[in-house]
Amino acid sequence: MSKQRYALFESRIVNAHELAQSSMIDTVKKRAFSCLTCPFPHRMRLVQTKNKRYTWQGHFRHPRSKHDASTSHGPRMSFGESDEHNEAKTMLQSHVGTYAFLVSKCGGCALHDCWEHGDDAVVELERSCRIDSRRYVYDAVMKRGSESIVMEVWHTHETGVTKISDTRAHGLQFAEFCTTDVMRLAAVAPRLAGENRQWIILNNLKPLIVSCATCTVQRVACEGREAAVRHAAAHHASNEVAVTACTWNQVVRREQEMHEVYCREYDKLPCIIAIKEKRIKQKEEAQRELQGLKYMIHRSRCSAWREEGHRRAMEAGSKVQHPEKYSPGMKKCSACCKWTDASRMHAIGQDKFSRDEYIALNKWYWDNDKNLPLQVLVCAACTVSCARCDKSFCSTHAIKYGMCFPCNKKCMRTQQ
């Protein structure tokens, strides 16, 4: 399961590190967060980490895979509701009229929010209701006359989508609260009849999102304007295509007319054909001669470079002498495996070797699954400068090819 720092919540991008520092972390963790990176929409879970070794105090986690054994849908054993769950339901019943919550809101504006304050209402616990062929038991139901609001407490498991949709389709309103959020009512005395007191706001985790008449009219008008703009753009594009096609037809007809005129004039002057063919043959012969001359020049240059490389390789081995004993600060040559002063070592890049040769020089790295170094150290006795590019390379290549590996490849490619 991968971890992410950012997720989507109600069309806003939120930071898990900032949410984890909230004082109401239990309520925040039960919000509906969506993934930002996956191609298909799915829920994300907010996880709070308190260990000091973590840089982020919180992160978002993907849901477990269906192949994970810990999330299998096999039979599970139920041990009843927890004490916190039962106490939270009791608080909703005993403190009715003390708290308020948002029942529904408009998705486009904040002018049509519907709040419930619990005035002149009673709360029943463990209310059973049968909808179609399914039977549901609600944690609490707030009743006022013919109006009923189902209130669920989210402690360890949230309410399923089917239960919420069936409840609202049956004409009941729905709200769900976090256990920690409801337990804040324990610090407040129950409200007496006729007492004027400020309400405690509970966070409804599943409010009904609707669209008011004003927002609906604006959305329809916006869609109409967008459709008009798309229609105008399509009409303009079709006109451009028609104009382009007409212009192109005119150009084609003009070219056909010019070709017919040219053919008629060309047939009247048969001698021009022989002159043009002769000039073309002369031009082709001159190009072939020039290419042959360039090839001979390049071939002679390559031979001279190879001879110079052989000479430099022979001189390098006789001039430089290796020390007899090892002393601190010396480096080991990758070619001759002898210890030499660091000042006499040359760093040669991997482009100067073939793949097999470079792996052989770094055999220890290759056998131990290490990253190969970008350069190898070669002593001055095993190093010469290329006669073509004047860059350092191994004298073994100079003896074998006369040039460095890339220069030799270029010469061979040109000669072919």
Image (cartoon, grey):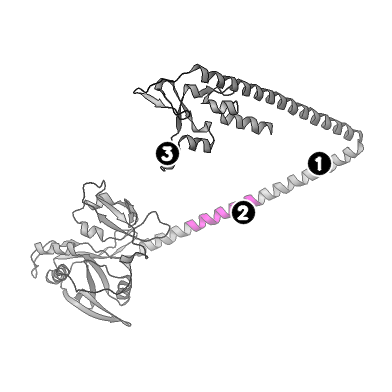
Which residue in the structure is indicated by mark 2?
A: 238
Check disc 1 and give the amino acid type. Answer: Met
Q: Residue 131 falls in which quadrant of the image?
A: bottom left
Nearest to N terminus: mark 2 or mark 3: 2
Please state which of residues 230 and 9 is positioned toward the viewer in this rendering.
9
**Distance from the alpha carbon under mark 1 to that under mark 3:** 70 Å
Distance between mark 1 and mark 2 Cα atoms: 30 Å
Crowd tier of the residue under label 1, counting other residues whose Cα lies within 10 Å: few below 14, some 14–19, many 20 or above: few
Above-or-below relation of 170 to 34: below
User: As shown in the figure, which amino acid type bears the numbered disc 3?
Assistant: Tyr
Circle 3 residue: 365
Judge depth for marks 1 and 2 and give the one in front. 1
Dominant secondary structure of the residues highlighted in magenta in the image = helix
Q: Residues within 10 Å of mark 3 (few under 14, many from 20)?
A: some
SS state under label 1: helix
Taking the spot 54% from the left edge, 57% from the top edge, the residue there is 231
What amino acid does circle 2 point to? Ser
Describe the element under mark 3 as helix, strand or loop.
helix
State the CA–CA distance, disc 2 to disc 3.
64 Å
Residue 258 has which mark?
1
Q: Which corner quadrant holds the C terminus? A: top right
The answer to whether the residues at label 2 and label 3 have Cβ atoms under 8 Å apart is: no
Disc sitting over residue 389 in the figure:
none
Total marks drawn? 3
Observer-nearest of 173 and 276: 276
Q: Is residue 21 magenta?
A: no
The answer to whether residue 194 is left or right of residue 271 is: left
Q: Earlier in the sequence, mark 1 or mark 2?
A: 2
